[in-house]
Amino acid sequence: MPNWPVFNPRFLRRIPEAMLILGIETSCDETGIGLYDTEAGLLSEALHSQVALHEAYGGVVPELASRDHIRRIIPLIRKTLQEGNRTLDAIDAVAYTAGPGLAGALLVGASVAESLAVALDIPVVGVHHLEGHLLSPLLGEQPPGFPFVALLVSGGHTQFMAVRDVGQYELLGETVDDAAGEAFDKTAQLLGLPYPGGPALSRLAENGDPGRFALPRPMLQSGDLHMSFSGLKTAVSLLVKSRGDDDHAHIAASFEAAVADVLCRKAELALEQTEMNQLVVAGGVGANRRLRQTLAERLARRGARVAFPPLRLCTDNGAMIAYAGACRLLRHPEAAQQPGQFTIHPRWNLQEYAQASGLR
Ligand code: KG4
Ligand code: ZN
């Protein structure tokens, strides 16, 4: 049995009102480290993307991902501290992505975070990856205040959430099949584009006419906030078979327009239903230029505001984990974990997480 105290109230007392926190993200194929100071803001961040490593396989290979995280994580932490002009012993707390994600990959970040916390005798907190994305627009310029509607659009999720405060998340609606990012990736594959498909498809779409092909807008009129993207991929597949390579840019642009149209219409409905006037967009697909433009234009027409994280913070990164960890520790010091008791949650529902942390 490890010789850890069962309860250590010292940790509750030792969370300072202002803190320097190191964030560690290793849930999938990006090793991300961020250094956030609650008074000075984001000091530095470093990222290593494994895109090149997994490219040949057309998707993420979990075992390769874990091994690469192990190789990169310590040099990245050093680089982040150096660029932030801080030493290891200046850190007040560590936050890591505890889930959801690939088990082996999560374990790398969790065990490094835990080791640092024990060695430095500072608190450590496990963060939900989606909470990181959800709060990441607050790291941007002119951050929105609470409450807001969040649109989470990543490779694994497409959800509307009412966010009333840190830890208060209500699911309003979500995709019933593929996530929007998944639809981007699969459509890109149909068009012969390299992995990961989203950015490649959106580059190709820049030379296409979004009105050339009328692709379906599934569940546009369903009256609720659920969405479906798998039919869109089937429609693209039929088009690709019946058209030549010359039409690929038009197909990409028409696909993007269909996704942006559905997400916009649903975003308008979410604001109507919640009587809120701010939308924040988070997750990898939030980097999509057409989606950003369409949302900004259409929401401005109804007097609502849309906020995006800075482009580099749309996809996975350590800065958002540091930020979410700081919010959590400052508002809910009891979220700090006992040393030696770190956990990971490869499958983890955001609302369950909020409820289990006793925040509602
Ligand atoms: O949030 P993220 O980095 O990882 C998780 O899924 O958690 O999101 C990755 C997804 C991928 O499906 C990728 O193709 C998509 O975001 N993505 C984009 C763009 N950049 C990344 N999709 C459309 N346009 C982009 N510019
Ligand atoms: Zn993500």
Image: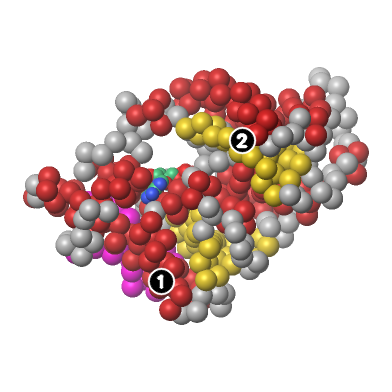
Q: Name the residue nearer the viewer: 316 or 225.
A: 316
Q: What residue type is disc 1 on?
A: Glu
The mark found on residue 33 in the picture is 2
Is residue 10 shown above or below 313?
A: above
Region rendered in magenta = 214-234
Task: Tell me, yes or no, if residue 126 can be seen here.
Answer: no
Is residue 188 shown above or below 26?
A: below
Whether residue 5 sits left or right of residue 215 in the image: it is: right
Quadrant showing the C terminus: bottom right
Residue drawn at the location 33% of the way across and 55% of the way down: 229
Q: Position of residue 345 (x, y in %)?
A: 60, 38
Task: Tell me, yes or no, if residue 160 can be seen here.
Answer: yes
Pointer 1: what residue?
297
Q: Position of residue 309 (x, y in %)?
A: 54, 54
Which secondary structure, mark 1?
helix
Distance from mark 2 CB to nearest ligand 2 atom below 8 Å:
no
Is residue 298 shown above or below 174?
A: below
Q: Position of residue 85 (x, y in %)?
A: 72, 34
Cα distance, mark 2 to mark 1? Answer: 34 Å
Residue 260 falls in image quadrant: bottom left
